[in-house]
Amino acid sequence: MEKYIDLHTHSTFSDGTYTPEEIMAEASNLNLKAVALTDHDTVSGIEDFKKAGEKYGVEAISGIELAAYYNFLGNKKEIHIVGLFVDHLNPYIIEKTKEISAERLSRNEKMAEKLTSIGFPMTLDELREFSHYGNITRAHYARLMVKKGYISTIKEAFEKYISSGMPGFVPRNLISPKEAIDIITKSGGVAILAHPTLYGMDYHNIRNMVKDLKEIGLKGMEVMYSTYKSEQEREITRIATEEELLFSGGSDFHGLNKKDIFLGTGKGNLKIPYSFLEKIKEERN
């Protein structure tokens, strides 16, 4: 029986609701062969994740997901780059993620103040507690707003208040794609472009972006992802093949923060083969 994998997941150390061990317990229940933990801007959960992998007999891939800006038609567009097989004990990645966390803290202070000023009082301490003292993300604002009775759903928070252009939103000062890829590669990892269809580009511009990123060290792209339609998966796979990129894929599992996305299978359509991971391992050797 073929074994499947998931190379894009999030835990309580960023904006997921499952602990690293709970992710691995679920992976074992689902008979997944390997899972990567790719929390936003942090590797703090990797040690727990690896121990849980040994406990449940699931291959644990140490990862990270970094946000960066890409210059597109004169604007800075946020893109995400996943790092697989990063060394979570490498001093360089530890130092760089500390710097990113400091920037996050500054943004979170401003965002809490802004939401308070428009009628949704909250404190940074409340958000820290709600995030289990991991990185605070917009998902934590949304969940706190629901808990405090300000709104009814997480979706409402994003649609009305905390997305770009909305009254409670504060933009982040993002690193460059080169900085993101350097953080990954200098800590022994393989840089993968995450979910390229989510950036509002057509396939021609996705290809141009891929070419740019390849020049600075990009090695792969997610050709399988929870929200891809069959046509998107086909076109992204074609681009990755023609541009000689490694194939990767993942659910982008967040637990209860994305209730319709399940570990391993995403929205029910994912079957990511272990062969993807084997090719990525070859790249490291």
Image (cartoon, helix red, strand yellow):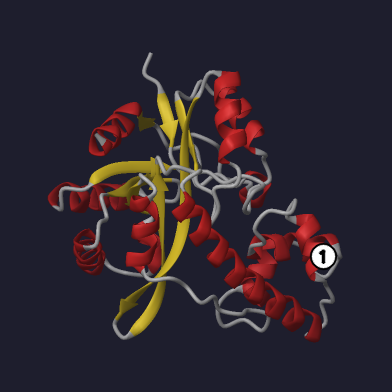
At horizontal 25% and vertical 50% (from top left) the residue drawn is: 219
Q: Position of residue 98 (x, y in %)?
A: 57, 61
Quarter of the figure with the N terminus: top left
Q: Vertical placement of 168 versus 44: above or below? A: below
Residue 210, quarter of the rendered image: bottom left
Q: Say left or right for 173 vs 272.
A: right
> Residue 121: percent from the left, percent from the top?
84, 76
Q: Residue at x 47, y 39 (%)?
A: 62
Query: In the depicted view, which residue is nearer to us: 104 or 74?
Result: 104
Give me the residue at 39% from left, 67% from top. Answer: 199
At which x and y percent is residue 73? 29, 83
In front: 240, or 181? 181
In this rendering, position of residue 36 left or right of residue 214: right
Say which residue appears at 67% left-offset and 61% top-offset: 136
Q: Residues within 10 Å of mark 1 (few under 14, many from 20)?
A: few
On the image, the x and y values in percent for residue 215 come to: 19, 62
Identify the secondary structure beneath mark 1. helix
Side of 170 where 110 appears, left or right: right
As drawn, which residue projects farthest toward the top? 1
Q: How many marks?
A: 1
Question: Which sits in the foreground, 210 or 133?
Answer: 133
The relative height of residue 170 versus residue 269 in the rendered view (above or below) is: below
- Mark 1: which amino acid? Asp
In the image, residue 172 sits, relative to residue 28, either above or below, namely below
Q: Locate the C terminus by quadrant.
A: top left
* Residue placed under numbered mark 1 in the picture: 125
Can you name the residue that lies furthest to the front here? Answer: 91
